[in-house]
Image (cartoon, rainbow, N blue to C red):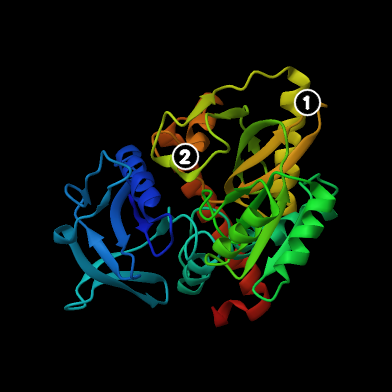
Amino acid sequence: MKLNLGLLFGGRSGEHEVSLQSAKSIAGAVDRNKYNLFLIALDKQGDWYLANEYDYLLNEDDPAKIALNPKSLKQVAIIPSQGSNELVFRKNCKTICSLDVVFPIIHGTFGEDGSLQGFMSMMNIPCVGADILGSAVGMDKIVAKQLLEHECIRVAKYLVADKDSDLKALAKNAEERFGFPLFVKPSCSGSSVGVYKAEDPEVLIISIKKALAFDRRVLIEEAIKGRELECAILGNIQLKASVPGEIIPQNDFYSYEAKYINGEAAKLELPAKLNEEEVERIQKTAVAAYRALSCSGMARVDMFLTAEGELVMNEINTLPGFTKISMYPKMMELSGVSFQDLINRLVELAIARHREQYVFLENVLGSSSY
């Protein structure tokens, strides 16, 4: 019997267009012998729609101009009920299907930060990727750094700024402690959105002000000189770590444009040119970071390898890109997991974790209460 799989994409974040690209790739790879696929598009205002698979995207081959096709969309809602969750048309409440599992490929705010995961948990729908805690922790760079430090995993040195900070004093402190250049990042933002490189105190202050437009807290981080490496992790308890890949930016850093728009802005080295000992250390560090941040399902773990051979954690992405140039599916494919099989395994992991949570809840509330 086929499962009804809802692919959620779009959303209100600054990574809306990236999500459309990821959805296109996933929809094209889903095994239709296993799943009935329902494309559920969220527009930039947060409204939910059922999309027609054949014409739901405009400019689909142009990452800079890709958009939802409003003519292909019909407003929908999810109605929770005991034993099933009905996807219905909002206009007449006609049932479309009962959702068995969802794959939320909504990157960034309201998709990768635990918000959507919490909603799906309340709806009693299995959800691909990390749970509420893992999503929230992975999204918050400051909290993630604090937890990684607690587990003795090396991270770049940093300071934190908010709207009440004395920026002149903070800039002076950062210069004295770390020197320049420095990177400025919103704490809860993905895909290098709102990230700036500062070469002097004046630019640093301007960059902090700009970054505060994206989040209430901002990270001021030392620049790490080293190779930019990534490792894909798959699993809940038993974890599979991929062969590492390397990002070789052609500009100052691996920007949003390099990740998703201009395929020539960065060179991807797959697999990365590393010896066996380096590969093993990178995989072990990636797994340790994944566990430290309470991740499940999947994540892409990013780190630096310095000239001295030290590994420095950069960040973790619990809903990594699934576009045609994204590293996560590429690294997994190189490690023996095809794109289609990857989708299957992620769905299986989501259902397994959901069943486990169901058992825990039964033990707390009693079987008659749930």
Dot 2 amino acid type: Lys
* Residue 114 screen position, x and y as percent: 55, 65
Residue located at (33% from left, 65% from top): 44
In which image quadrant can residue 75 be found? bottom left
* Residue 294 screen position, x and y as percent: 69, 56
Q: Which residue is mark 1?
A: 307
Dot 1 amino acid type: Ala
Mark 2 or mark 1: which comes first in sequence? 2
Q: Residue lying farthest left?
A: 71
Q: Which residue is mark 2?
A: 259
On the question of residue 147 being in view, the answer is no
Looking at this view, is 186 or 105 the one in front? 186
Q: Is residue 100 left or right of residue 61?
A: right
Under tag 2, what secondary structure? helix
Looking at this view, is 279 or 5 the one in front? 279
* Residue 28 screen position, x and y as percent: 30, 39
Q: Is residue 333 left or right of residue 142?
A: left
Under tag 1, what secondary structure? loop
Determine crowd level at label 1: few under 14, some 14-19, many 20+ residues with C-alpha closer than 10 A: few
* Residue 148 screen position, x and y as percent: 78, 52
In which image quadrant can residue 261 be found? top left
